[in-house]
Amino acid sequence: MDDLEFLKLRPPGKASLTVTFPDGVVSTIDDINVEVLSERCLLLALAFEDGPRGLKYSIDGASLAVVASFLRYLYLGDYRCVEIDGTLRPCSLLLHAELCRMASIYDVPGLSDAARCNIEYDTQQSLSYPNPPDELSEAIAFIYTKLNNHAFQKPLIDSILHYCVSCFVQHNLAGNDAFCRLVFDLEPFHKDLHRINLEREFVDDGAPYIIRLPDCKIPPPSDAIREFVAVIFCCSPVNEQAASDPTSRRSTEGDTSTDERPFVLVHRPKIPIDESAIQSGTESEGETSTPEDEGFMLVKPPKQSTTTAPPTPRAPKEPSRRQIPNFKTEEDEYSVFGHAWDDLLDEATDPEWVYVPK
């Protein structure tokens, strides 16, 4: 396949094509006719530049067979060799896939169609042979990793997937170490294999074996559950390092700038606290800290009237940290969970937990 005898079938040219292979080997193909290339690949013909010995151009190729097949198509319109008896010379699936990639790079739609048809032909012919096509696993890995264009990838991989499902038992793909390793490592291929198996309604002999094929599950990130909870409750996830640090946690709890709740629950101990003693003790120690600095707030609810007379209207006052204000609306008093402030104070004469506005 990598012979270049077809170059003699057209008038020789003065262009040279330098090919660099993955192993670092460089090869040069001479006597290329640029006018012949322009008939099927104008992009490649225009890429040649003037050199000391004529036109020249350099490309990267996976192998000499791939480059020779590419030039054969540009010269003859077909890249497959025909034997003396008229049969096609065997060709690997990997070569078809690599030519499809070169067709995508140099904008040769005819070559892409030819490569796809040859893949379908070879997979269909494999049904009559005892062995799978040549370089099956390599071709599947190449298509999934190199052909990112969905328009090129899906037709190629669907033909191979249908073959894999239908001939899974016939060609003993379960005993093919390279194939099983590919299914285990390449998760998209494993999912597509199950998809085709489902589309064929599990009628093939290998359907139950395909279902039991192991795969490599990628472990979820450590904060996946925390992010899910954050999305459900519309809050930002908490950093584990910040949550474990008491200093950072204390500053986060005290910061109410981003809290959208209209009230806060404050714990008021039943043991009375002498505020003058606290202030005097603080001044004696030479500190200026307040209860707010210690992480809590002193709340002093208003005293309730012991008379049965209706309460007189009170003028609105500025909210104080040590007094629960009487919020009024146009229709009713400001309520928490459907209860007015006065009702809450009537039900609990000495509440330990009270709601105060921010």
Image (spheres, rainbow, N blue to C red):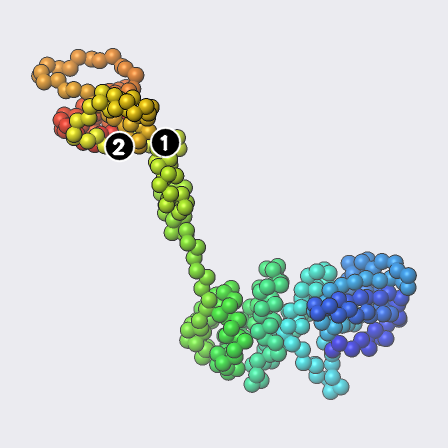
Residue 87's x, y, as percent? 70, 83
Of residue 179 and residue 194, the one placed in the foreground of this image is 179
Image point 19% across, 20% down: which residue?
A: 302
Residue 107's x, y, as percent? 72, 60
Mark 1 closeness class: few <14, some 14–19, many ≥20 residues within 10 Å: few
What label sits on residue 256 in the rendered view?
A: 1
Image point 45% across, 79% down: which residue?
A: 205
Give the residue type at disc 1. Answer: Thr
Of residue 135 and residue 219, the one placed in the foreground of this image is 219
Above or below for 328 versus 250? above
Pointer 2: what residue? Answer: 265
Image point 35% across, 33% down: which residue?
A: 254
Residue 33 falls in image quadrant: bottom right
Residue 149 falls in image quadrant: bottom right
What secondary structure is found at the residue carrying circle 1? Answer: loop
Give the residue type at disc 2. Answer: Leu
Residue 157's x, y, as percent? 57, 68
What secondary structure is found at the residue carrying circle 2? Answer: strand
- Number of numbered discs on residues: 2
Left or right of 225 on screen, residue 266: left
